[in-house]
Image (cartoon, rainbow, N blue to C red):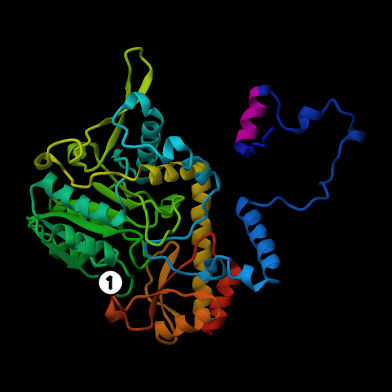
Amino acid sequence: MRYLPKSPADRAEMLEAIGVASIEDLFETIPAEYRLTEDLNIPRQHSESEVLDRFRAFAGNIASGNAEELAKQPATKLFASFLGAGAYRHYRPVIIDSLVQRGEFLTSYTPYQPEIAQGTLQAMFEFQTMICELTGMEIANASMYDGSTGAAEAVMMAVRVTGRSGAVVARTVHPEYREVLHTATQHQGIPATEVGYDAATGRVDLAALDAAISSDTACVLIQSPNFFGTIEDVAAIASIAHAKGALLIVSIAEAVSLGIVKAPAVADIVSMEAQSFGVAVGFGGPYCGVIACKEKFLRQMPGRLVGETKDKNGKRGFVLTLSTREQHIRREKATSNICTNQALVALMVTIFLTVYGKQGLKELAEQNLAKAAYLSGALTAAGARRLFSGPSFNEFAVELPADASSVNEKLLEKQIIGGLALAKWYPELGESATLWCATELTTKAQMDAAAAAIG
């Protein structure tokens, strides 16, 4: 038999069902002198990630005696990485690949025939449901390409909903998301006005934002946590946008933040990159974009939507519905020319969220928050300076004691991939500005080593 672990809540529910107060009560028929009262003399249990790390270490020790074998080891396993900026290293439970590699999912095509695609359709439906619970929105689609195209589609959706043509975009939105937005809108008559950030907090400048919104502004696009890792005041921004009749779009690049950061329920549209939920950082993709929104905007939502219904026998079933894409309807009637979704990658997200659950996701977010706080303190003690005072999640911007490129070169010599240099997109911050990230996979030893190298 497989061992299926139970949470404390599961155990309490089982005990209540059988009518006993505690596990000890189950063994009261056994005489006390025959009961074991001390702990078993065995090592503590290991998590799945710790077990995998131990086997990698064993493999490394074996390979170290043979240069040819050592060369075959994945080079990235040897390096500590502090990169984030829209692509995050999180632990992927092994069950994800075990399930998504089943032929029913791996080789399946668009589920046009619901009678033979109920498994795929149900997985999409569960994905949509969990995304709504996370974001505080009322409906969600069955995924988009990624977070960047999702943000662009959300802006174009807002233009259709409001009948207005302009967009106000915070400069704290991921620079590459803004580039994709420009590519998508430059020939559609959708001008985008960028708004700067407060140099002290790293949050969008609210006064400048208010001044930039006009009677022709369809939407305001922000990101939270933003590109600097700072959490925006979403409620205040929503009040400013709604007062002038504009919609608020909140882009989320680090999905794990929703385990601890308040859901942007005051937004009208949420565009999210769900890569953090069990999708490997795979040289640029594939990722998993999401659009969720208020139900009243349903018919302008791009992408594919799965609905629940009943068959003629009254049994629960799932179907594609309101799929306003070029694959389904005439091009001139389509809300988007994105002609597929990321069903297999969305399934990874669904499995990840199912495995972690609400409490698990909260604990995962707390780990990220704690690791980033420790890293920030270590870097500051080593001579770095935090650039912004606004609240952050698992990444933050710092000014290093020297220019970022030279520091990162020195760190690479110690098998450490340092933070992302920010001067390329934000030259006003200087050549020493970098963006650092710590997740649950970042160890204390790695953080201490990076701080020591910088010091």
Tell me what residue is drawn at x 24 percent, y 37 percent: 295
Question: 240 or 350: nearer the eye?
Answer: 350
* Left or right side of 252 for 1: right
What percent of the width, then of the height, locates residue 270?
A: 28, 49
Q: Residue furthest top?
A: 313
User: Is residue 16 covered in magenta?
Assistant: yes
* Left or right side of 242 for 350: right
Q: Residue furthest front?
A: 68
> Is residue 391 among the parts visible in the rendering?
yes
> Is residue 267 among the parts visible in the rendering?
no
Tell me what residue is drawn at x 38 percent, y 83 percent: 432
What percent of the width, then of the height, locates residue 130?
A: 40, 40
Instruction: State whether residue 46 is above or below residue 396.
Output: above
Question: 396 or 349: nearer the eye?
Answer: 349
Instruction: State whether residue 61 is above or below residue 287.
Output: below
Return the residue at label 1.
198
Tell me what residue is drawn at x 87 percent, y 28 percent: 30
Instruction: State whether residue 124 is above or below residue 39.
Output: above
User: Is residue 57 covered in magenta?
Assistant: no
* Left or right side of 391 for 27: right
What percent of the width, then of the height, locates residue 32?
A: 89, 33
The quarter in which the N terminus is drawn is top right
- Label 1 neighbour load within 10 Å: few <14, some 14-19, many 20+: some
Name the quadrant containing residue 33: top right
Magenta residues? 10-17
What percent of the width, then of the height, locates residue 72?
A: 58, 66
What amino acid is found at the position of numbered circle 1 in the picture? Asp
Instruction: State whether residue 256 is above or below residue 401.
Output: above
Tell me what residue is drawn at x 53 percent, y 51 percent: 363
Question: 6 or 359: nearer the eye?
Answer: 6
